[in-house]
Image: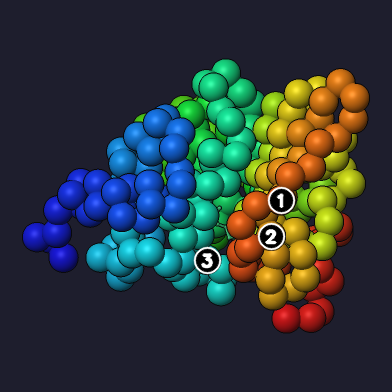
Amino acid sequence: MATMDYKELRKAMVRDQLIPRGITDPRVLRAMEEIPRHLFTGPQLEQHAYDDSPLPTADGQTISQPYMVAIMTELLELQGNEKVLEIGTGSGYQAAILASLAREVYTIERFEDLAKNAAERFRMLAYTNIHVKTGDGTLGWPEGAPFNRIIITAGSREVPPPLMEQFGPEGILVAPLGDRFSQRLVRLRKTRDGMETTFHTPCVFVPLMGAFGWPENRK
Ligand code: SAH
């Protein structure tokens, strides 16, 4: 709808969906207020872009609910100088948020059409610090490693072992871990003494597929 004021809807999204649920990082709130989520949904769903829910994308996948994007981003504690790896590009919205808060974003999507559409959106919005590739994200992006941060935006039972190797000391990884139909956000932090694990909000993500994900032949 041409008459919708998306800037106002974004303000309302931050005010009504993010702040009341406890998102406090001012940089995260600002990024969510500035980045045009409606340009990542495709034209048919544009008017729902700021709804308090996930939205479908091509290939039966989803764009996460705004709150889920915000809390995952907040848990990454981005200061601005990080190299971030995202598994599951989808629409590209989460990657765009990350790219506005970190130095460099590498993002992997298993479906080529999603990866291509996302790359086109990044070009249109003049992002120069996002690298997209089509492939199996459970293998990570060895040529780009080590990363300061890793975010997995599809659900799995455990963190794929190659990803555990691809974030460095003081690094943070955030992922929805659990069973196929319900998970919990988990944050791993590599400290000098080992790994620190914290558990966060329950969530439901589409399954992480691939060599270290769920098997392809079960839907
Ligand atoms: N971050 C996205 C939401 C992603 S939904 C956004 O902001 O829109 C999860 C995505 O993970 C889907 O697009 C799905 O195709 C992708 N995915 C699932 N398994 C994958 C794998 N092994 N490697 C790369 N992408 C994967």
**Residue 106 in sight:** no
Q: Is residue 97 left or right of residue 136?
A: left
In depth, the one of 201 and 215 nearer the eye is 201
Spatial CA distance of label 2 from label 3 is: 17 Å
Q: Are marks 2 and 1 in contact (CB under 8 Å)?
A: yes
Q: Is mark 3 within 8 Å of ligand 1?
A: yes
Locate ligand 1 by image quadrant.
bottom right
In the image, what residue type sits under mark 2?
Arg
Query: Which residue does the numbered mark 3 point to in the structure image?
Result: 62
In depth, the one of 112 and 122 nearer the eye is 122
Rendered residue at 79%/42% (across/down) = 197
Mark 2 closeness class: few <14, some 14–19, many ≥20 residues within 10 Å: some
In depth, the one of 89 and 183 nearer the eye is 183
125 vs 208: above or below: above
Spatial CA distance of label 2 from label 1 is: 7 Å
Q: Which mark is residue 199?
A: 1
- Foreground label between 1 and 3: 1
Residue 108 at x, y percent in the picture: 65, 47
Q: Is mark 1 within 8 Å of ligand 1?
A: no
Extreme residue in the left direction: 3
Rendered residue at 56%/74% (across/down) = 60
Please state, as top left, top right, bottom left or bottom right, where the C terminus lies in the image.
bottom right
State which quadrant residue 185 falls in.
bottom right
Tag 3 secondary structure:
strand
Residue 211 at x, y percent in the picture: 86, 59
Rendered residue at 57%/18% (across/down) = 81
Query: Which residue does the numbered mark 2 point to in the structure image?
Result: 184
